[in-house]
Image (cartoon, coloured by chain):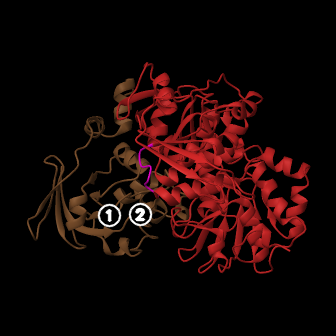
Chain colours: A brown, B red
Amino acid sequence: MKFKGKAWKFGADVDTDAIIPARYLNTSDPKELASHCMEDSSNPEFMKKMKPGDIIVAEKNFGCGSSREHAPIAIKTAGVYCVVARSFARIFYRNSFNMGLPIFESPEAVDNIKEGDEIEVDADAGVISVLSSGREFKIAPVPPFMQELIAAGGLMAYTKKKTGLS
Amino acid sequence: MTITEKILAAHCGKKEVKPGELINAKLDLVLANDITAPIAIKEFRAAGAKKVFDPDRIALIPDHFAPNKDIPSAEQCNLLRQFSREHNLSLYFEVGRMGIEHALLPEQGLVVPGDAVIGADSHTCTYGGLGAFSTGVGSTDVAAAMITGEAWFKVPESMKFIYKGKLGKWVGGKDIILRTIGDIGVDGALYRAMEFTGEVIKKLPMSGRLTICNMAIEAGGKNGIIEPDEITEKYVSKRARRKYKFYKSDKKANYAEVREYDLTNMEPQIACPHLPENVKPVSQLAAVNIDQSVVGSCTNGRIEDMREAAKVIKGHKVHPYVRMIVIPATQAIYKQCIKEGLVDIFIDAGAAFSTPTCGPCLGGHMGILASGERAISTTNRNFVGRMGHPKSEVYLSNPAIASASAVLGRIGRPEELR
């Protein structure tokens, strides 16, 4: 997997209410959720400005708060390729692997990427590069079980295989 | 092993587990609500599943936007209802019988000590107060668990919190957990089990224990847990619908970190906007005016919380510029409030008294804030926009402070009421 896109920077502790405010949770329609992605964050205009294929780069504890899977669904459906952060909140991390939003931990990359930088994330090589400067940063390795989940196509595909559901 | 490790080991058929180990655990209960279940149900159906693993171990509780606040919410609640009927689920709770999930399940004896539980709601960690392992997950995890009755976990490292000293008047579980989150931060226990111990915890009633474990997620924790004891036994023995087992941490158990607190002379604690870690003692916030006071939620909607709020406000009036909204967490608590005359006290004071719902806690309904408005609330989160407009503010407190503040029109203590 290789992702190339423009970086949108966010601060620390971006919570799930900032990613998708609860007032929109009376639906689980992915497109509807995506239209409000990051609406209560530090960049409420995110959906107006971003282009599909862009990448979110955030500080520590991204996705803290609620267990709502609507958060990674909104981000993925908005067309964000992947999220790079210093660290992720536990349930958001788990949800992202389960439903197939690629996420990567790299404190070094977060320190060195500026808003608007064109970056490339090479998931297989475990490297994030800033294209303008050519600098490269390592991605924290993904635990083996999570790699298995990704390879299977997410938790439901993995469960189907395991239980013999067709 | 710690209590958390022992419960996880017992649920994956192993004698021993170690932090970092990946396990597949059998679950005693799987939970989802009207916000998270719809996605789980769609995933369950999309996978071609025809049967749930056990119709008596899946709890679907419409509590967030129920009683239905609008047409889309009605559709979501209806999806839970139809799925429950289709699969004969015995633990679907209709409006009129339902309550806020994390208050309802312990009250009804549907989660018990020694359980392993997942719920598609981050505050599922509440049941650690009973000595159970319980953790919040997403909808896809619940969809898979409804099929298999299992979930994968990385065994968490444990952090031990020891509380010493004597709690002052109007200080309780909420203040203990706010103090702790204020100390370690909103990711201070990321991926870890938070084990709460010490002489203060040993004397704490079950309501306070549930409040503490409820907010473990606000420090990033995977679960919060308290060793069960006589207080647990007394609470559980008359309600448990299943066999239960008390697990205790070994004296030589390993902890990633141990923290000690002396709580003597600790004031009531308040979390200021916009993170639960922005904690200050109440005396530093006396200049903060409020527009709304909310008493309720899975954190502080139990009968003990209702009694505390009523005791403070009895004989007083809610400030003319304040709306006070009191929401008992379950029908049984609601009825008990009527029996004890608490509803009269609240209504005579000029407060609204509502049927159980999560409502305002997550900015759903029943008390949304306008731009520039400020609430004090016994709920669990004060993120930007949490209770309404992105330019509104939420301060988190215990029920006594929320009640006193409603009368004062500003953040204050019961001792300030004349």
Crowd class of label 1 (few under 14; some 14 to 19; many from 20; radius 10 Å): many
Q: Residue at x 46, y 62 (%)?
A: A20
State which tag comes first along the sequence, 2 or 1. 2
Quarter containing the N terminus of chain B? top left
Query: Does residue B185 appear in this view?
Result: yes
Residue B379, compared with residue B221, is above or below; it is below
Query: Can you tell which quarter of the image residue B201 is in?
Result: top right
Label of residue A58 in the image: 1
Residue B85, compared with residue A89, is above or below; it is above
**Cα distance in 3D space between marks 2 and 1:** 8 Å
Q: Position of residue B365 (x, y in %)?
A: 66, 64
Q: Position of residue B138 (x, y in %)?
A: 47, 45
Q: Position of residue B79 (x, y in %)?
A: 59, 45
Magenta range: B186-192
Q: Nearer the viewer, residue B22 or B370?
A: B22
| Residue projecting furthest to the left | A134
Q: Is residue B189 magenta?
A: yes
Residue B194, compared with residue B413, is above or below; it is above
Q: Are marks 2 and 1 on the same chain?
A: yes
At numbered mark 2, what does the secondary structure look like: helix, strand or loop?
A: loop
Query: Does residue B65 appear in this view?
Result: no
Q: Position of residue A7 (x, y in %)?
A: 24, 68
Are the residues flagged by discs 2 and 1 in contact, CB closer than 8 Å? yes
Q: Amino acid at mark 1?
A: Ala
At numbered mark 1, what does the secondary structure look like: helix, strand or loop?
A: strand
The chief SS type of the magenta part is loop
Q: Nearer the viewer, residue A144 or A6?
A: A144
Query: Can you tell which quarter of the image residue B209 is in?
Result: top right
Label of residue B14 in the image: none
Label of residue A14 in the image: 2
Query: Can you tell which quarter of the image residue A160 is in?
Result: top left
Q: Is residue A21 magenta?
A: no
